[in-house]
């Protein structure tokens, strides 16, 4: 299972969306509006994101700011 991440638009650092999916589920997912809103722990703003902006990180992979 992988974490779904986006980048904070203010800091450009990765943040988790709170969603976990395998690659096949992520690619076929139709995300609802409530799934694509989150309060960023870095900048405290509400981010509304699209699936095209998100990426997966496997649980055993490091999450880096690069």
Image (cartoon, helix red, strand yellow):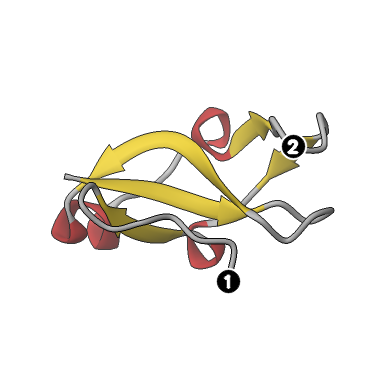
Quarter of the figure with the N terminus: top left
Q: Nearer the viewer, residue 4 or 59?
A: 59
Could you tell me residue 32's position as x and y percent?
Answer: 48, 37
Residue at horizontal 81 percent and vertical 29 percent from the top:
44
In the rendered structure, which disc, 2 or 1, sits on the residue that comes first in sequence?
A: 2
Crowd rating for badge 2 (residues with CA inside 10 Å; few <14, some 14–19, many 20+): few
Q: How many marks?
A: 2
Give the SS element for disc 1: loop
Could you tell me residue 3's position as x and y percent?
Answer: 33, 45
Whether residues under marks 2 and 1 lie with C-beta atoms below 8 angstroms apart, the answer is: no
Which residue carries the number 1 mark? 66
Res. 12 image quadrant: bottom right
Residue at horizontal 57 percent and vertical 35 percent from the top:
33
Could you tell me residue 28's position as x and y percent?
Answer: 24, 58
Q: Is residue 30 left or right of residue 58?
A: right
Crowd rating for badge 1 (residues with CA inside 10 Å; few <14, some 14–19, many 20+): few
Which residue carries the number 2 mark? 42
The numbered disc on residue 2 is none
């Amino acid at each position: 299972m992988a974490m779904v991440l986006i980048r904070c638009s203010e800091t450009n650092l990765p943040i988790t969306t709170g969603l976990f999916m395998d690659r096949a589920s992520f690619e076929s997912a139709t995300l609802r509006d409530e799934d694509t809103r989150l309060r960023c722990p870095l900048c405290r703003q509400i981010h509304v994101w699209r699936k095209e902006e998100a990426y997966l990180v496997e649980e055993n992979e490091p999450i880096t700011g690069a």
